[in-house]
Image (spheres, rainbow, N blue to C red):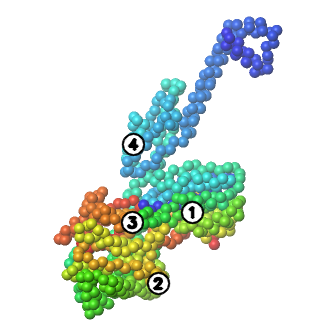
Amino acid sequence: MEETKRYLRSFLSQHKIDISSGKTALFDEFTASEKNVNAVKIIQENQKMIMENWMLKNKIHDILTQTVSIPNGTVNKKYYAKIDFNTLGWNDFIALEIEGLENTGLEFTKNDELVGTPEISGDLKIKIKFRIEGEPEDSALNEKIITLIINPDPKSLWKNLESDKNDPFWKPDNEAVAAKFLDKNIVIASKRGRSHANAGSFREDDFAYKNLKEIGWSVLAVSDGAGSAKLSRKGSKIACESVVQYFEENLKPENLKEFDQVLAEHHNKASDETSKKISHFVYQNLSKAAHAAHQKLEEFAVKNETELKNLHATLIFTLVKKYDFGYAILTFGIGDCPIGLLNKDLTEIKLMNWLDVGDFGGGTRFVTMPEIFQSDKFSTRFGFKLVDDFSYLMLMTDGIYDPKFVVEANLEKIEKWAEFLEDLKGKNEDGTKVDFDKNNPDIAAQLSAWMDFWSPGNHDDRTLAIIY
Amino acid sequence: MRRLPVYFLLDTSGSMYGEPIQALNNALSGMINTLRTDAQALDSLWISIITYDREVKEIVPLTELVHFQLPEITCPQSGPTNTGAGLDFVIQKVKKDVIKGSATQKGDWKPLLFVFTDGKPSDIQFYREKTQEIKNLSFGAVVGCAAGHMANDEILKELTDNVVHLASADSSTLKQFFKWVSETIEQGNKSQGTGESVTLPPPPSEITVVI
């Protein structure tokens, strides 16, 4: 009764009709009439229903237009995403069906999780069918689509296109050799990177080695041709070969006698004088070899009417001799390829060269750059070590060093080298092993197989030379 | 892992309202999908999308392509083109985001910047200050794209030598343009091994290179 009265007073007031004091009795009688009481009741029920319907529609609309973002997935990579209904404000669902996951490798669990291993890439449209509280039991379900982006498996995207064998400067995409190096063994594998295989371009790394039996020294050179230099495959080849050639032609037994003596003296009792003489010899001979490489590159550029920078290549090399008192190891390096010497009991690593690394990726230096030879830092590019024995002497390009050591600082940590050795010996994802037994005839193939390791973002050419 | 950071600075001033912004959204989405199927890009590409009109907005901060989700880009019905403010924002971000190499951390590849506009800077003085700063940052490439007859090629030339002109900002032209952009990015990815600038691939016929 009071409710009817309040409602009608408000209704009349909305129409600018006020009940004057003289009409109070009349109004009381009007609102008490059963007919009016019922009419108000029906109106109020209808209003309530309209309001509820609107709220329901509004709520459903909000859900349908709500942005739901779930993390992207990748084919063959475990996926997990929790659809948190509470956070989304979806706490009044009374029916829920998920469609669109058939044959995708994914499923929706009881705990509202989207889990599985995606099998197909693309924009996966997931249909969420739902009914919320207040909707009739038999009403059709609402449909909301959310998009799940599935990236392709990066491994599946790499193509392996053969390089053009008719190219005048063609070289094999992969090479692997094993041989003797002094009284030790050497194994070298050089492999075209996936980035090049994907485009059918050439391997740009190279290597060369030789036992110069007449003088008792052995030489090993490794070079990495620059990715953007169009003839760098030739550049790296020339660089390595001309170093070997230089030593072959210029180191003569008669000129080396004095140095043999200096080394013997140095071994007996190292003095400032012996050190100085050694530095002098190393500098004189190795800088000439590096310079010879530079000159050969220049000659090639002139002859082929191309710019020297098209031959950009880094260069590291080592010259090693065995004496009764140990091994003399001489090194030189331009660029970002390390030379590491591991001692006999694997407790110490000597990084023989420093690396040219810039502020940004790719900011290295090349043997093709004339300014290298004029720089004040040129004299610091040489390395020397006299050791009783060693376990491994390794030369590698950044295709190996980037994925396995990541940053320069790690090259001086023995634990990183220990890990690297373990990795070579089979402690890796694929269980690929290199057996360093001196009588293992398959070592070259093993190293080559090991070199196929997968490392995201590291798809450069890979070259690793190990004297063991 | 080395990242290739790529910044998109996109004009969302009033003149882009309507069909152009729709076309831009479609073209961007097409480009992202193309890049997703590139082995190299999927491994190293990081993308940021920044828009500028009266305000500068970071639509997507620098995000790995694998995790990248492109939201709908909208624009106001009218308002100025604060290109200078946009560049200023990019400069701050590049200084903060891009990792320089050292003995203990791996440096990123040099970042790429694509500036898209259909008009000319309203904040021309500020713009000129900022073009100089952009040049002093180590970008692998800065590409300016002027779309439609209102876009000023000459002013964009002050920012970079790499300026292309699109006849209009319609759907098919933008699609072509962003296809070319993805090729340029892939190129940037390939020039690993030198510190030199990225060589741009030849653009399709819809795109005029401004000399």
Q: Which residue lies under the disc numbered 3?
A: A409
**Pair 2/4: label in front:** 2
B103 relative to A246, above or below? above
B25 sits to left or right of A200: right
What is the crowding at mark 1: few (fewer than 14 residues within 10 Å), some, or many (at least 20)? many
Cα–Cα span, label 3 and label 2: 27 Å
Q: Are marks 4 and 3 in contact (CB under 8 Å)?
A: no
The subunit carrying tag 1 is B
Label 4 residue SS: strand
Q: Which residue is mark 1?
A: B113
Q: Measure how far apart labels 3 and 1 are at the Cα level.
A: 31 Å
Examine the image and state in which quarter residue A419 appears.
bottom left
Horizontal and vertical percent position of residue A445: 25, 68
Residue A115: numbered disc: 4
Secondary structure of the residue carrying tag 1 is strand
Question: Going 50% across and 54% down the picture, which residue do you hit?
Answer: B63
In the image, residue A55 sits, relative to residue B69, either above or below, namely above
Q: Is residue A272 above or below residue A32?
A: below
